[in-house]
Image: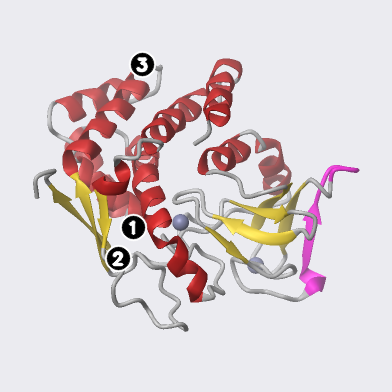
Amino acid sequence: MSGTSLHRFEALAEEDAISAPLARLYAAALRSAADPAWEVGVAIDLEALPHGTSRAPLLHERAIGIESARLAFLLEELARVVAAQSIEGGQELWDAVTGGRLDAVALLAASIAHREIEFERLAVQASVPASLLTVVGQALALPVLGACWRRARDLVRQLEWRDGYCPVCGAWPALAELRGLERSRWLRCGRCASEWSYPHQKCPFCGNADHRTLRYLAEEGKQDTQRVEVCEACRGYLKTFSTITAWSLGDLLLQDLTTVELDLVALDREYRRPGPLGFRMDTRVVPRDREA
Ligand SMILES: [Zn+2]
Ligand SMILES: [Zn+2]
């Protein structure tokens, strides 16, 4: 991640008390993600690629090998960030992590598949609210999924991906970019930072392509730079921004976090973001030691 977006995350944490906990958590995860050691700390076997018509994201039914000490170190760092702020359950999280009652590999696996029942189980074991574990788990997964995306990038280009969810990790897009002078539409994943091109005038959530039921909400005069695209068929919404080039993961998380006013406009009109995943992921996480 660029130094500029890290700096902007820190500035946001200072300025905005509501976004501060999440901004600090993301900043810690992204600082870690910038460490090139993740490239060797994460292993995925991308042999036996799905054929062209498969609708399964690349990480589905695959194992991610993870350097467990590196992951445990990141979880401890995230717990330290949470405990330093007045967040409900923050101290309990720190106690669970340092007391060995929260397994980083199990939390990562629950996050990648977004398995609520697994978050609940880990929450009971660690005596930490499941909602807090969900957020920390998302941050924990960022460097890992980011490394998976970098590994899979060239393969994704060959896939001719046509679905609305992420071709790598199965998440619904965090936002859309209208990129460059030609304003081509790119969906962006807020978990692994992947990008995939997607037709204009088509809802990524339900595939609706009837222009009579697709429209956008925008502030007068700003519709070309930022708007919320909505679908009357499924009531889903997607924040959409014009960009010059592709945003980094840090930039797109920051953009999402600093445009809450657009979410409010959509929520006010009873549009919603669907749950985190568009595909039911089955991905195993296998711990491995540095020596292995
Ligand atoms: Zn993804
Ligand atoms: Zn829709």
Q: Amino acid at mark 2?
A: Asp
Left or right of residue 12: residue 78? left
Q: Is 152 within the magenta?
A: no
Distance CA(mark 2)–CA(mark 3): 34 Å
Crowd band around label 3 with a 10 angstrom C-alpha radius: few (<14), some (14–19), many (20+): few
Q: Residue at x 53, y 73 (%)?
A: 161
Mark 2 or mark 1, which is nearer the start of the sequence?
Answer: 1
- The residue lying toward the viewer, choosing from 11 and 182, is 182
Mark number, residue 113:
1
Q: Earlier in the sequence, mark 2 or mark 3?
A: 3
Residue corresponding to mark 2: 282
Please provide the residue range marked out in magenta: 211-222
Tell me, yes or no, if residue 109 can be seen here: yes
Q: Which dot marks residue 219? A: none
Q: Quarter for ligand 2?
A: bottom right
x and y, in percent, of residue 57 in the image: 41, 68
The residue type indicated by label 1 comes to: Ala
- The residue nearer to you, when weighing 285 against 116, is 285
Compared to residue 189, the image places residue 48 above or below, namely below
